Amino acid sequence: MKVFKDESMRVPVKSWCINPEDGAIEQAKNLARLPFVHKWVSLMPDTHQGYGMPIGGVLATKGVIIPNAVGVDIGCGMCAIKTNVTAYNTEILKVVFDEIRKVVPVGFNKHAEKQDSSLMPEISGGYDSVIVREYDNAHYSIGTLGGGNHFLELQKDKENNLWVMIHSGSRNLGKQVADHYNKLAEAMNQKWFSSVPLDWDLAFLPLDSQEGQNYLVEMEYCVQFALANRKLMLDNVLKVLKTHFPEMAPEPMINIAHNYARLENHYGENVVVHRKGATSAKLNEIGIIPSSQGSTSYIVRGKGNQESFQSCSHGAGRTMGRKQAKNTLNLTAEINALNEKGIIHSVRSVDDLDEAPSSYKNIDVVMAEQKDLVDIVVELSPLGVIKG
């Protein structure tokens, strides 16, 4: 763990990423200059520059909440499930993936029909609620993967058990909530002549304001919707697997979010812990740390490290931006590397290079840098992936 501190910062930045990129450092320094920051800013090993706050960042605040320190895909996270299936081959899995694509829309696609209302989290709110406004649209989006780095992956452990892992969030619902409350925060901060510069993209809402309370309610709804979204996708995947493996029996689902804020107590004070591309890693808490589609993913157990606010990385983290990946990576080399491993992958054209394995950090380095945050419970090797 590395510590950054200069005279402009109220608190230090503690980084489990030994060599964070310059943009992430500058954003972390802005966080460390905030008048309401608690103790320090923590950067996880997968950290990289984000919008306002670095991805892979953990920030504890006193009395305020920052929409951009949660991000636009509120509740985005991982779920994973182990099955007892051990007899499979590439040809069967290719058929399975073809059938999964028919029941799990990807990218901007949604279901053609509304999904069952019982799948949706309960809704409330008598104010000008974003989730009330977007509720009807969300009926079509629940159970869909989305785009970008979201994925649906089949994996195997060292005993050859088949696993399902899904990375997805709250779809457009979370973005609508994030954008609405960030605009509110910016307007309120300008009205109050806030000392936090607008160009830091860290406008805040006081917790004791109606706007702050409304954001907490709507943010939590998005977290629950994102979980319901993953659950429905997982159920549909398991139905497909059941047709090919009738004796399949899944174990309980593991779920963990990595874009949210939560009221917690750290170092004797009640604070708002923002995790943006970071996951909770309380003592003995089971979590998920995925990698790229060509590398090992991990089921982990938290160590409850107080200095990270009991957090760990949410993945491998990017080593280059999406445009840079498309402009610099070699398509043939990326395809060949995946083919050599026998992975059913999603790299087909230059447009797919932003999710190629070489655009991500080395997961072995990431895991080594956070050995004081988590213990590895299960190693999972990729068999095939559907990318958003």
Image (cartoon, rainbow, N blue to C red):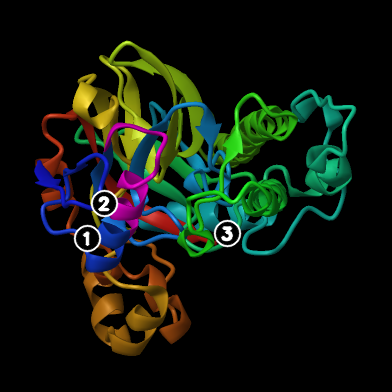
Q: In the rendered structure, which amino acid carries the disc numbered 1? A: Lys
Q: Which residues are magenta?
A: 27-40
Identity of the residue drawn at 84% across and 49% down:
137
Disc 3 versus disc 1: distance between alpha carbons?
29 Å
- Name the image quarter holding residue 215: top right
The residue nearer to you, when weighing 237 against 16, is: 16
As for residue 32 lying within the magenta part, the answer is: yes
Residue ID for mark 2: 46
Q: In the rendered structure, which amino acid carries the disc numbered 2? A: Asp
Q: Position of residue 289 (x, y in %)?
A: 31, 40
As for residue 247 lying within the magenta part, the answer is: no
The residue nearer to you, when weighing 182 against 37, is: 37
Q: Earlier in the sequence, mark 3 or mark 1?
A: 3
Q: Tag 3's secondary structure?
A: helix
Q: Tag 2's secondary structure?
A: strand
Q: Position of residue 287 (x, y in %)?
A: 34, 29
Residue ID for mark 1: 361
Disc 2 versus disc 3: distance between alpha carbons?
32 Å
Q: In the rendered structure, which amino acid carries the disc numbered 3? A: Asp
Q: Position of residue 302 (x, y in %)?
A: 25, 23
In what quadrant of the picture does the N terminus appear? top left
User: Is any part of residue 317 visible from this angle?
Assistant: no
Residue ID for mark 3: 98
Q: Earlier in the sequence, mark 2 or mark 3?
A: 2
Identity of the residue drawn at 44% across and 68% down:
346
Pointers 2 and 3 in contact (C-beta within 8 Å)? no
Pointers 1 and 2 in contact (C-beta within 8 Å)? yes
Q: How many marks?
A: 3
